[in-house]
Amino acid sequence: MKSPICELLGIEFPLIAFTHCRDVVCEVSKAGGMGVLGAAGFGPEQLEIELKWIDEHIDGKPYGVDLIVPTTMANQDESASPEEVRAMVPDEHKNFAAGILARHNIDTQDIYENVGGGGGGFLGENRAANILDVVFAHPIKLVANALGVPPRYMLELGKKHGVPVAALVGAKHHAVKQAEAGVDILVVAGTEAGGHCGEVSTMVLVPEVADAVKKYPNVSVLAAGGIVTGRQMAAAMAMGAHGVWTGSVWLTTTESETSPVIKEKLLSAASNQTVRSKSRTGKYSRQVRSPWTDAWELEDSPEPLPMPLQSLVSEPALGKVIRLAEGGHQGAKQLATYWVGQGVGLMNESLSSKQVVYEFMEDFLDATERLKSFVDE
């Protein structure tokens, strides 16, 4: 295709796949798109293992890495020790979370034993620098940052290594700020997106941002948010995007590392069964609705803590929920939740990652032919 993003990234089809699964990264890239490994949660040693494996299995095709270096969060400068970070979490929040599990017949005595005090996958200044050293030691073709303007050293390393730097945005003024900072690719994520998202719909946000950054001709726009089909991709590109950034659609692929319990839940979920909540990370993120998310919306619930402290409440609890759910615990199955966009209602069967790419291509071509028929004489 002739999209600027294809030329920039060296890919055949402007479909970017964000995933935590290295197998999906490889399969998407080998099928003509680009896989991007979500590195949140990996330490330097494990990330080195993951990227080395990708290098050995991706047949030289381009791939990227996505990090979460928030602009604002507690302990941003990492001056507090893990023990001090854990001490910032009030007992009120841990007791509230434990109460949700207890009402679903889950033993809560050991939930918060041996809990780490890190950033829950969110990187402060020092950890981000260490991770970037690992990332740029590999032949990546894209590096992305979520939750704010990328750190200056990420932008500098990108320029030094000739690697485009992407950033996620959920509002027009954020997009302009990112373009001014020197970001190469804007991932314009509407509120339909899974994970962290804003309030404006993809249908409105994409053309709004495309117009706002016209004066930055070297900045590419990728649409994101609820996009799980080629026809949606065609619509986004008609609105000014150069391609799409997708995440949710890869959760139910056959290669995905997603828990079988979550896969089953996502494949049967309707588009209105997701909720935008602070209950998981402390910032708004969209996830499949469950009694866990419902409980945090009640009047007597505590206000979610700032990032990354809320993750120190939610992740130990939800980690135990998933382990029990996979063993058949009915209460845990009800509580189980995961990040997913509103496009989940269109995700009705588990396909291979390669098959998903090919279906995107076919659906995209069908949509463009349909549009063309409206204007052909």
Image (cartoon, grey):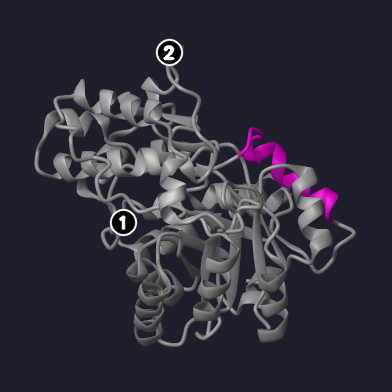
Q: Position of residue 249 (x, y in %)?
A: 41, 51
Instruction: Write down the region rendered in magenta.
Output: 198-213
- Please report the residue visible at 37 percent of the width from the left and 21 percent of the height from the top: 295
Of the image marks 1 and 2, the number of the one nearer the N terminus: 1
- List the single residue furthest toward the left: 328
Query: Where does label 1 land, which residue?
Result: 253
Residue farthest to the right? Answer: 215
Residue pictured at 53% horizontal, 62% vertical: 67
Using the numbered discs, state the Cα–Cα distance from disc 1 to disc 2 in whole angstroms.
38 Å
Q: Residues within 10 Å of mark 1 (few under 14, many from 20)?
A: many
Residue 155 part of the magenta-drawn span: no
Residue 2 visible in the picture:
no
**Horizontal side of residue 71 vs 196, given as left or right:** right
The vertical placement of 244 against 261, above or below, is: below
* Whether residue 156 is situated above or below residue 76 in the rendered picture: below
Secondary structure of the residue carrying tag 2 is loop
Question: Disc 2 designates what residue?
Answer: 300
